[in-house]
Amino acid sequence: MSLSKILLYYTFTPIADPTAVMLWQRDLCESLGLKGRILISEHGINGTVGGDMAACKKYVRKTKDYPGFKDMEFKWSEGGAEDFPKLSVKVRDEIVAFGAAEELQVDEEGVVGGGAHLNPEEVHALVDKHGDDVVFFDGRNAMEAQIGKFRGAVVPDVDTTHDFIAELDSGKYDWMKDRPVVSYCTGGIRCEVLSALMKNRGFEEVYQLDGGIVRYGEKYGNKGLWEGSLYVFDGRMHTEFGEDYARLGHCVHCGEPNDVFVNCANEDTCRKQVLICENCVADPATAVCLDCAEPAGPAS
Ligand SMILES: [Zn+2]
Ligand SMILES: [Zn+2]
């Protein structure tokens, strides 16, 4: 039995020929028996792959041969090839889909004009200095914040990353343009782009949480400014930083504490993920999201 692992990584760096990099990466992964998903654009690479430990090590070494990838950080996590249905290596306009391919500028140092990176200790220092003036700005989909967020954070009304530009342009957040703003997301990649888009729109003092909630949680657990569960994009759906976490999520039907998202049972027409407890999921009438639920009462 050999040990297996999952690798998570991204970097923003100019890629002159994304198709050539895609073909090279596909061959490399196939030859090593890795599965997972890799996106490549003119702005960089964003990947999650799993396989044998030895194959993962070799993948990291070979990938770092490409000059733009030589300083890329790889996060190692539990799992393996069996956690992915197949290998998918694709060229896209963007490695995170903000709909900002034209606006985003990238050079050898990464995203041009992004927010300054703060590690968890530096975030605390900023809060010590400026107190409640500091605004935490959630860079994820609004749904993810239903089960966990930074205390007092502003959660934009976005279903997908694609909605951020319209949201920022709406004027709703203009009040924070002269305040210190700390943008945060799961692992940091979304804030690389988001913080640059915010600065381009006149937000003067924008920071980004380096390594995202994941690194913050590893450092401070539930003893810092983070509250609740972290939504994750794998079979686990959510994860916590220790048992002593705050339960922010509630079943949309009965209100019981609940951190588990399920797909709305109306799967043919509705793709919403929604917080529904075990009891309510068992009843077809409450196994659906609120929009799909039969109107109760005489309103109709
Ligand atoms: Zn319920
Ligand atoms: Zn629904």
Image (tube, rainbow, N blue to C red):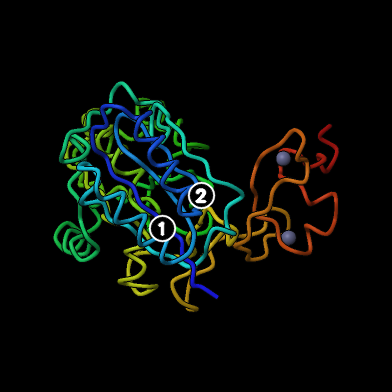
Q: Residue at x 21, y 49 (%)?
A: 70
Quadrant where the C terminus is found in the figure: top right
Q: Name the foreground residue: 88 vs 13.
A: 88
Q: Is mark 1 on a helix, strand or loop?
A: strand
* Residue type beneath disc 2: Gly
Disc number placed over residue 36 in the picture, else none:
2
Disc number placed over residue 184 in the picture, else none:
none
Q: Which residue is drawn at 16% across and 38% down?
A: 108
The quadrant in which residue 121 appears is bottom left
Q: Which residue is drawn at 67% across and 65% down?
A: 256
Q: Name the foreground residue: 8 vs 264.
A: 8
Q: Position of residue 184 (x, y in %)?
A: 33, 51
Count neighbours of disc 2 (C-alpha within 10 A) and say few if under 14, some if 14 to 19, many if 20 or more. Answer: many
Q: Cβ(mark 1) to ligand 2 < 8 Å?
A: no
Quadrant where the N terminus is found in the figure: bottom right
* Residue type beneath disc 1: Leu
Q: In this view, does 16 lie to the left or right of 92?
A: left
Ligand 1 rendered quadrant:
bottom right
Q: Name the foreground residue: 240 vs 276.
A: 240
Q: Is residue 110 left or right of residue 246?
A: left
Q: Residue at x 50, y 36 (%)?
A: 160
Q: Position of residue 264 (x, y in %)?
A: 72, 45
Disc number placed over residue 7 in the picture, else none:
1
Q: Position of residue 268 (x, y in %)?
A: 77, 35
- The answer to the question of whether label 1 and label 2 lie on touching residues, with beta carbons closer than 8 A, is yes
